[in-house]
Amino acid sequence: MSRFCALFGASPKSCIEILNDLQTTENVDACMIKPNPIYFLMAMNWLKSYKTEVELAGLFNVIEKTSRTWVWKYIKAIQALQHQKVSVSARGHIPVTRKTVLTLSLFPSFICC
């Protein structure tokens, strides 16, 4: 579990919830009919580590253009979930209403394990 969190910045359960949200949301900018779990995890890894395209391509065994294309597609979709999943109170605190907590200021303290 700790290795997964270290690599992707979220627990497996959080990743599954985000993937489910991407498939079931009514937000057109976030909706993905059949998200690819590998490309999703590649995007999660980039959010955690800000690796270069070359590093991502090597880690996930894809070419650089593929890593760039899919990482940005998933990042934009995850960001589009922000208004649906995150609300900030008057005091600036983020209320936790689900376990899928996205601190999308984008993206420094993403999802804690």
Image (tube, rainbow, N blue to C red):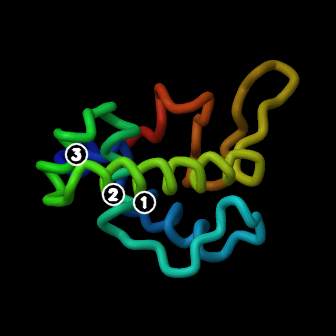
Depth-wise, is mark 3 or mark 2 nearer the camera?
3
The residues tagged by marks 3 and 2 sit, at their Cα atoms, a distance apart of 11 Å
Q: Quadrant of residue 6?
A: top left
In the rendered view, would you say 28 is above or below 60?
below
At x 70%, y 33%, the residue is: 94
Question: Pointer 2 and pointer 1: residues touching (CB < 8 Å)?
Answer: yes
User: Given the image, on which type of amino acid does mark 2 rest?
Assistant: Leu
Residue ID for mark 2 = 41
Q: Residue at x 42, y 60 (%)?
A: 15
Q: Which residue is mark 3?
A: 56
Q: Position of residue 104 (x, y in %)?
A: 60, 35
Give the amino acid type for the residue marked by disc 3 in the picture: Leu
Calculate the distance from the C-alpha at mark 1 to the C-alpha at mark 3.
Answer: 18 Å
Q: Is residue 103 left or right of residue 35?
A: right
Mark 2 secondary-structure assignment:
helix
Which residue position holds label 1? 15
Mark 1: amino acid: Cys
Residue depicted at 12% across the width and 49% down the height: 58
Q: Nearer the viewer, mark 2 or mark 1?
A: 2
| Residue 47 in picture, x, y percent from top left | 40, 38
Relative to 46, residue 90 above or below: above
Location of the C terminus (image quadrant): top left
Q: SS of the residue at dot 1?
A: helix
